Amino acid sequence: MGLINLLSSNPTAFVIIAVALALSLTVHEFAHAWTADRLGDPTPRRFGRVTLNPGKHLDPLGTLLLLIAGFGFARPVPVNPANLGRWGTLWVSAAGPLSNLVIALVAAVLLKVLPHTALTVTVLLTVLSINVVLAIFNLIPIPLLDGSRILGALVPSLGRSLAQFEAMPFSFLLVMGFIYLAREPIGRLIDTVQSAVLRTVGLI
């Protein structure tokens, strides 16, 4: 799903997609920050994260990985669970993936209503696909991802264990290893959700 090949074959599409995906990561983190702010946690606002300014959210390595590998990350939004409570934490955690599903749905709607030129189809399908990837990956209930915080809010005792795992050295590498080993079922789930989004707007 890497996009680097587009740089030589279709540079216009590459630039449009790169901007759209940077904004997708930005909206994901903004959704976390805005939801926490609305639920009474001042931490994201104190760190300047309740904004749609990409410079406040993007991580250079995570953005580069998104363009190369089709999956990346932004700078996590700092929140204080003590200010949110159990269910507030759940909604803050879910807000990011839900925002990506909304972007994917918007891309599908645009794909349905706009003329089907090579550029629009390439751009909108790529934006749709990668936002589905961002949503599904982040909903996996393993540490460092939003899904683990959702699971932790639903099962507080498990949440404490997940938080302890996150604090361990090399936890990131262990999580990446798990995702690599589970890439086939994750890929099937992503395909299913993408098909559901396209079906919702009548494209298939």
Image (cartoon, rainbow, N blue to C red):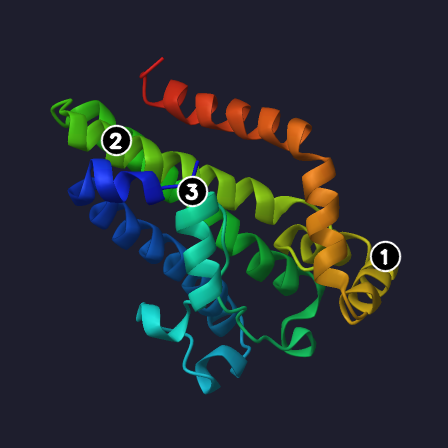
Residue 67 lies, in percent from the top left, at: 39, 49
The answer to whether mark 2 and mark 3 are in CB contact below 8 A is no
Residue 193 vertical placement versus 156 (above, below): above
Report the quarter where the N terminus lies: top left
Q: What amino acid is found at the position of numbered circle 2 in the picture?
A: Thr
Observer able to see residue 126: yes
Distance from Cα at disc 1 to Cα at disc 2: 42 Å
- Going from N to C along the chain, the mark reached first, 3 or 1, is 3
Q: Quick one: label 2, few (<14), some, or many (20+) residues within 10 Å?
A: some
The residue to which callout 2 is attached is 122
Q: Along the line of sight, which residue is nearer the eye, 54 or 6?
A: 6
Q: What amino acid is found at the position of numbered circle 3 in the picture?
A: Asn
Residue 47 vertical placement versus 64 (above, below): below
Left/right of residue 162 with respect to residue 130 in the rendered view: right
Left/right of residue 51 with respect to residue 40 in the rendered view: left
Distance from Cα at disc 2 to Cα at disc 3: 14 Å
Left/right of residue 164 with respect to residue 128 in the rendered view: right
Q: What amino acid is found at the position of numbered circle 1 in the picture?
A: Leu
The residue to which callout 3 is attached is 131
The residue to which callout 1 is attached is 158
